[in-house]
Amino acid sequence: KAKNDAFDIALDCGFEASYNPSNKRFIRIIQQFFSMKKIKSADILFVQYPAIDNRLLEIMFKHMNPEGISIALIHDLPSIQGVRGGDKQLEIYHLNHFTHLIVHNKKMEEYVRGMGYDGTIVSLELFDYLHNEQRDIIQDEFSNTISVAGNLTKSRYLLSLDKINGVNFDLYGIKGDMDFSNMKNVQYKGMLPSDEIVYKLTGDYGLVWDGDAIDSCTGV
């Protein structure tokens, strides 16, 4: 949803889409490849980072005007996430091709500065989120329940939640092969669209953590 929202916001700001993104990854790669040939030297280029493929970035850099304005809106930094393509030197090499970066907050700004980025940085502090529908939020009785939503497969600590006494957990999102069926204090409530979950989310607290243990800060 974040990239779709950024796409819509960019259109509202006067940018023109270089292609109409397909829902299929392979087709998007082809679309991006051919769209790069349309880049003109006078264009102000707006790119959502990271790209679908680093090789596409390399091709795009060859078509960019080094004297022009280029903006990268950062959604994630693979060098922090530790995922494929997360080489710090490669990442700063890519980012330094852009004259401007839009980052999440001051901490991310400090991180990319520390990596060696020397262009202009704009810090959002709050990431833009488009939502037009208005409905009443359901209020439940306090139940000492913690909600966790997102890609649950990144949070292996969830498999140890049954070791925590006196607290219940409601889980939402992609769970892959994770099995919570034998955990009495855990309810898996499936996957919901991001603009729908705000009306269905239950619990008293929200937890944001992608680690692999319940008793230490490991797995970052």
Image: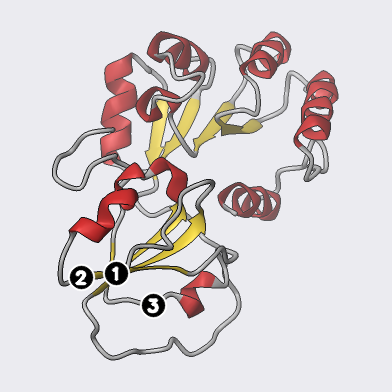
Q: What residue is disc 2 on?
A: 167
Mark nearer the viewer, 3 or 2: 2
Q: Where does the image place residue 57, in percent across and percent down from the top left?
A: 64, 17
**Marks 1 and 2: CB-CB under 8 Å?**
yes
Instruction: Assign the C terminus to one quadrant of the image.
Output: top left
Residue type at tag 2: Val
Q: Residue at x 33, y 52 (%)?
A: 158
Q: What residue is disc 1 on?
A: 185
Q: Compare residues 55 and 74 and report the one nearer the observer.
A: 55
Q: Is residue 184 above or below residue 173?
A: below
Mark nearer the viewer, 1 or 2: 1
Instruction: Assign the N terminus to one quadrant of the image.
Output: bottom right
Badge 2: few (under 14), some or many (20 or more) residues near its Cα, within 10 Å? some
Q: What residue is disc 3 on?
A: 202
* Horizontal side of residue 163 vs 58, given as left or right: left
Reading the chain from its start, which is encountered first: label 3 or label 1? 1
